[in-house]
Image (spheres, helix red, strand yellow):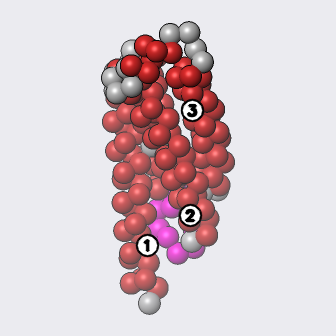
């Protein structure tokens, strides 16, 4: 199962953040008060919501890619399950940004998600680097 969940959850997360992008377009172009929204382009909630949208799609794509690689190289990689869980935990970052914007929660989820995703990417990179050395 290492990797399969990353792919499935990655696609579902990407779909959510793509739909969220449509909400942002609505707020920018069609919603009442759109002028205020546009004027706050690089400030406050507007900036934070764009960060969540971009990082949500990036981290979703990373989960799809990591999941594919874990499935394809499962017999050659050590710690695949841990890398898989760290990548999934990384999705807490964009969710954490949204929880800050909409619920005023502290940025703990953002930090946990960012550290988890960064660790999973570095760990997987090091695993691939060592793979040639181990299997040579």
Magenta segment, which residues? 74-81
Among numbered discs 2 and 3, the one appearing first in the sequence? 3
* 80 is within the stretch colored magenta: yes
**Residue sitting nearer the eye, 115 or 58:** 58
Assign the magenta stretch its main secondary structure: loop
| Residue 46: x %, y % from top left | 42, 23
Which residue corresponds to mark 3?
21
Q: Looking at the image, do the residues carrying marks 2 and 3 touch, with CB atoms under 8 Å apart?
A: no
Secondary structure at numbered mark 1? helix
Determine which of the numbered discs, if any, sits on residue 51 in the image. none
Secondary structure at numbered mark 2? helix
Among numbered discs 1 and 3, the one appearing first in the sequence? 3
| Residue 57: x %, y % from top left | 53, 43
Q: Is residue 126 left or right of residue 61?
A: left
Determine which of the numbered discs, if any, sits on residue 128 in the image. 1
Count the labels in the image.
3
Which residue corresponds to mark 2?
70
| Residue 126: x %, y % from top left | 37, 68
Secondary structure at numbered mark 3? helix
Tell me the residue at 47%/68% (across/down).
78
Tell me the residue at 40%/66% (across/down).
125
Tell me the residue at 61%/70% (across/down).
72
**Residue sitting nearer the eye, 101 or 91:** 101
Task: Judge whether residue 6 can be spotted in this image.
Answer: yes
Q: Quick check: 95 above or below 60?
A: above
Instruction: Tell me if mark 1 has few (under 14), some (14-19) or many (20+) residues whose alpha carbon lies within 10 angstroms of its own.
Output: some
Quadrant of the drawing holding the C terminus: bottom left
Instruction: Give me the C-alpha separation between circle 1 and circle 3.
Output: 34 Å
* 128 is within the stretch colored magenta: no
């Amino acid at each position: 199962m290492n990797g399969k969940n990353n792919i499935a959850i990655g696609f579902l997360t990407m779909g959510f953040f793509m739909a969220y992008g449509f909400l942002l377009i609505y707020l920018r172009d069609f919603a009442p008060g759109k002028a205020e929204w546009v004027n706050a382009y690089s400030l406050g909630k507007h900036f934070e919501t764009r960060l969540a949208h971009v990082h949500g799609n990036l981290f979703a794509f990373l989960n799809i890619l990591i999941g594919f690689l874990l499935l394809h190289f499962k017999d050659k990689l050590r710690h695949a399950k841990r890398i898989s869980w760290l990548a999934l935990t990384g999705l807490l970052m964009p969710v954490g940004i949204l929880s800050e914007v909409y619920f005023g929660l502290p940025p703990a989820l953002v930090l946990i998600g960012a550290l988890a995703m960064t660790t999973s990417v570095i760990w997987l990179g090091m695993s691939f680097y060592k793979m040639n050395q181990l299997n040579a």
